[in-house]
Image (tube, coloured by chain):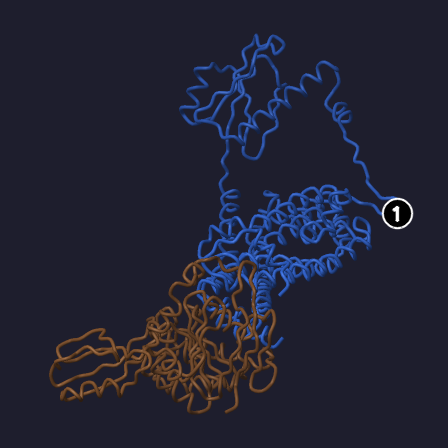
């Protein structure tokens, strides 16, 4: 499948540090892509280069098959930054139309699109309200609407669910799926790993300005699996220990074990079958993205870096 | 370009549609003139006649002290201190001067003034002046032994006529009008730079604290956002100013119609009407009209608009840069603003010198240097081009100002681009300097 975005050896240095240090990856059209990393890893800098706010020091960006030109391509991108806000005193309807015009839509197009989306997200009655009268969740919804209103090919969402209640979060999630189905590509940047596991097809993990992980969610989990299994037996067998595995934990007649190197799961099953115990269930335990994230990031200098001055 | 226009439109409309805009634009001049009118009304209507009785037993004043509109000197005879005090108590008089028969100024005797209530500063001054004048005249008359007419002819001052080598006569009226126009336009430019510069700064700070900056920067270039804001607020300033000027002129005309006698009793109202009155009295209407037509108003207005726009563009981009660098705390802005406000203050200092001596070295420098030229040059131009300001100076000043604002806009845009996305950190001038000269 063709790529919507290719990053080749992107670098961006600030005076005191390398914010983005030689990062390359591809994003397929129509996929939901997770960009993960601890605070200060360089995610925001990376996103700002993709949205044309910053120019990379070196490396290049290919957008939709051609070299990225911020001037013309900006209308094909929708970016919802982590630091986001709106004019407090401006009416919501006017504000949405204004921001759509800045994207490059004509006034009539903008008006039509805003009306359509207000209806879709059941916000019609908000038109004349001011932003200062909205709750945090409501303004979050408005932010999302403004980002996707012009149906861009590439949508970048930085922590889109923060401040949303489960009902509205689901509403937004459904819209994200819908947009992806209609051919938009979504870059999703967050710390919330359970959301990533649920939504994303492909992830990239950056830390200290470098890419340290790249793959589909399933691939990544396979890559970091620790051969852990859980087995549930009808009773406790006479001989529990075996050279094929180590018991990590057990609760009543359920065991969590790690299979030793050189052995397979069949060896475990044979051990219990030979003792004439019924195996009620046998499952592989794959690591969660959360575990992988912590495993990869912990112990690096990322925490210290997050607090360093960015200049 | 199109996006700058959209942004400017929003900036303009969002300010013009506010109630505070209407209030400050229309009510402010009305209130100021209302107060002004009240002051004049009371000044004209209340005839606070202050009666002073003079018991001149030593004949110091020769029986005559010129009365003023509000202070009347009455000579009384055969009064004692007690009877004068009594008169004060009966409110027949407000105060008295009692000169004993053996009074001798050469022996260090002083005249004393006794009043019922404390005398105000103004009246004190007037009384002192009148009494001094009367005593001096009397002394001169007696010691020179001449009559009043001879004394007047001795004291007659010769009006000197000033003219330049080109043969142009420069009468006092013209210089006075040039001074007034120069001072007023220099001061107006100073106000504009401050009011609208700060407005730009606050607008930028609002965008930053609202966290809308990055949302917008992802669709337009930071430069476009900055220029849009500057253009929009500049347009607000121009509109507000035109309304103020129209209102001021119509109110002034209305005021003169309402209080026809106010113009000559209070010189601070309507310099022009006052000058006209005076000219009428001396039979020299033509002189004032002549000097008014000598002053090149189309040139002054043209230059004013140019220096208004040029100065505003030059400074507003600097204000925008400062706004982008500060965080929520307005205190931070104070220290960063200092280097910007300093040249404006210098400008006003040089300007006060320039209206007194429009061709001195400092005035010439100030009117060429782009950071002060909008203020100083506007003070010099009313004195005449090319009389006071040679063409080359005007041209150089214009070129330098255009160059100046291109330069400050360029530098500010670089600072702005970094600053607008920078949160949670106190910025110093050193860092701003680094941002301005950083590649990319």
Instruction: Give above or below for B7 relative to B136.
Output: below
Which residue shows up at 58% across the image and 87% down it?
A: A65
Where residue A11 sits in the image (x, y, percent)? 57, 70
Chain letter for the blue part: B
Horizontal side, residue B157 vs residue A297: left or right: right
Where residue A116 sits in the image (x, y, percent)? 42, 88
User: B130 or A289: nearer the eye?
Assistant: A289
Which residue shows up at 39% across the image and 72% down it?
A: A130
User: A143 or B381: nearer the eye?
Assistant: A143
Q: Colour of chain A?
A: brown
Instruction: Give above or below for B380 relative to A205.
Output: above
The quarter of the picture where residue B87 lies is top left
Instruction: Give above or below for B52 relative to B265.
Output: above
Q: Residues within 10 Å of mark 1 (few under 14, many from 20)?
A: few
Q: Is residue B249 visible?
A: no
Where residue A214 sits in the image (x, y, percent)? 45, 79
Q: Quadrant of the C terminus of chain B?
A: bottom right
Horizontal side, residue A195 vs residue B23: left or right: left
Where residue A202 sits in the image (x, y, percent)? 42, 83
User: B257 or B236: nearer the eye?
Assistant: B236
Which residue shows up at 65% across the image and 43% down it?
A: B349
Query: Which residue is denoted by mark 1 in the rendering?
Result: B166
Q: Is residue B95 visible?
A: yes
Which chain is home to disc 1? B
Q: Quadrant of the N terminus of chain B?
A: bottom right
User: A3 or B234: nearer the eye?
Assistant: A3
Horizontal side, residue A125 vs residue B229: left or right: left
């Amino acid at each position: 499948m063709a790529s919507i975005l290719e990053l080749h050896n992107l670098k961006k240095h600030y005076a005191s540090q390398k914010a983005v240090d030689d990062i390359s990856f591809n994003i397929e059209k129509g996929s939901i892509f997770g960009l993960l990393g601890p605070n200060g890893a360089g995610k925001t800098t990376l996103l700002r280069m993709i949205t044309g706010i910053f120019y990379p020091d070196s490396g290049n960006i290919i957008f939709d098959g051609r070299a990225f030109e911020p001037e013309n391509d900006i209308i094909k991108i929708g970016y919802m930054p982590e630091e986001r806000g709106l004019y407090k005193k401006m009416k919501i309807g006017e504000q949405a139309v204004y921001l759509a015009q800045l994207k490059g839509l004509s006034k009539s197009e903008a008006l039509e699109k805003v009306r359509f989306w207000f209806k879709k997200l059941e916000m019609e009655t908000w038109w004349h309200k001011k932003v200062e009268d909205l709750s945090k969740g409501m303004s979050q919804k408005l932010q999302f609407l403004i980002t996707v209103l012009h149906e861009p090919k590439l949508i970048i969402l930085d922590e889109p669910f923060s401040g949303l209640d489960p009902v509205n979060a689901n509403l937004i999630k459904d819209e994200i799926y819908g947009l992806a189905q209609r051919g938009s590509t979504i870059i999703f940047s967050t710390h919330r790993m359970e959301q990533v596991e649920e939504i994303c097809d492909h992830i990239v993990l950056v830390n200290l300005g470098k890419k340290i992980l790249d793959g589909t969610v399933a691939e990544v989990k396979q890559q970091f699996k620790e051969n852990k299994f859980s087995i549930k037996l009808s009773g406790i067998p006479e001989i529990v220990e075996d050279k094929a595995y180590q018991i990590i934990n057990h609760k009543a007649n359920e065991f969590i074990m790690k299979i030793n190197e050189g052995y397979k799961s069949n060896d475990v099953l044979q051990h219990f079958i030979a003792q004439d115990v019924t195996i009620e269930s046998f499952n592989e335990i794959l690591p969660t993205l959360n575990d992988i994230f912590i495993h990869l990031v912990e112990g690096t200098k990322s925490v210290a870096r997050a607090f360093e001055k960015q200049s | 370009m199109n996006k700058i226009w959209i942004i400017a439109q929003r900036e303009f409309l969002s300010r013009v549609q506010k109630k505070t805009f209407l209030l400050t634009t229309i009510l402010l001049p009305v209130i100021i003139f209302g107060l002004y009118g009240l002051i004049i009304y009371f000044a004209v209507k209340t005839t606070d006649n202050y009666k002073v009785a003079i018991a001149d037993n030593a004949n110091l004043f020769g029986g005559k002290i010129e009365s003023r509109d509000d202070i009347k000197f009455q000579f009384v005879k055969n009064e004692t201190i007690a009877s004068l005090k009594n008169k004060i108590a009966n409110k027949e008089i407000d105060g008295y001067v009692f000169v004993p028969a053996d009074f001798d100024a050469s022996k260090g005797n002083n005249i004393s003034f006794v009043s019922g209530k404390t005398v105000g500063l103004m009246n004190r001054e007037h009384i002192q002046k009148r009494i001094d004048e009367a005593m001096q005249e009397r002394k001169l008359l007696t010691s020179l032994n001449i009559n009043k007419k001879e004394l007047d002819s001795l004291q007659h001052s010769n009006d000197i006529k000033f003219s330049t080598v080109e043969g142009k006569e420069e009468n006092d009226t013209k210089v006075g009008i040039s001074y007034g126009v120069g001072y007023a336009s220099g001061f107006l430019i100073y106000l504009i730079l401050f009011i609208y510069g700060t407005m730009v700064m606050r607008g930028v700070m609002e965008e930053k604290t609202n966290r809308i900056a990055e949302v917008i920067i992802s669709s337009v270039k930071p430069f476009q956002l900055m220029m849009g804001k500057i253009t929009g607020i500049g347009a607000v300033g121009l509109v507000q100013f035109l309304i103020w000027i129209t209102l001021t002129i119509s109110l002034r005309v209305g005021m003169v119609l309402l209080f026809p006698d106010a113009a000559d009793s209070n010189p601070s109202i309507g310099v022009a009407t006052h000058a006209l009155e005076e000219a009428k009295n001396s039979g020299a209407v033509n002189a004032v009209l002549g000097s008014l037509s000598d002053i090149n108003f189309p040139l002054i207005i043209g230059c004013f608009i140019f220096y208004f726009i040029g100065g505003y563009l030059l400074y507003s981009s600097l204000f925008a840069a400062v706004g982008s660098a500060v965080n929520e705390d307005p205190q931070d802005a104070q220290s960063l603003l200092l280097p910007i406000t300093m040249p404006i203050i210098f400008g006003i200092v040089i300007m006060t010198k320039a209206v007194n001596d429009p061709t001195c070295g400092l005035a010439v420098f100030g009117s060429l240097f782009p950071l002060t030229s909008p203020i100083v040059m506007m003070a010099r131009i009313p004195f005449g081009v090319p009389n006071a300001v040679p063409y080359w100076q005007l041209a150089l000043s214009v070129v330098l100002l255009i160059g100046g604002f291109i330069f400050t806009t360029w530098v500010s845009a670089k600072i702005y681009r970094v600053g607008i996305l920078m949160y949670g950190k106190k910025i110093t001038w050193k860092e701003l300097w680094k941002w301005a000269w950083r590649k990319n």
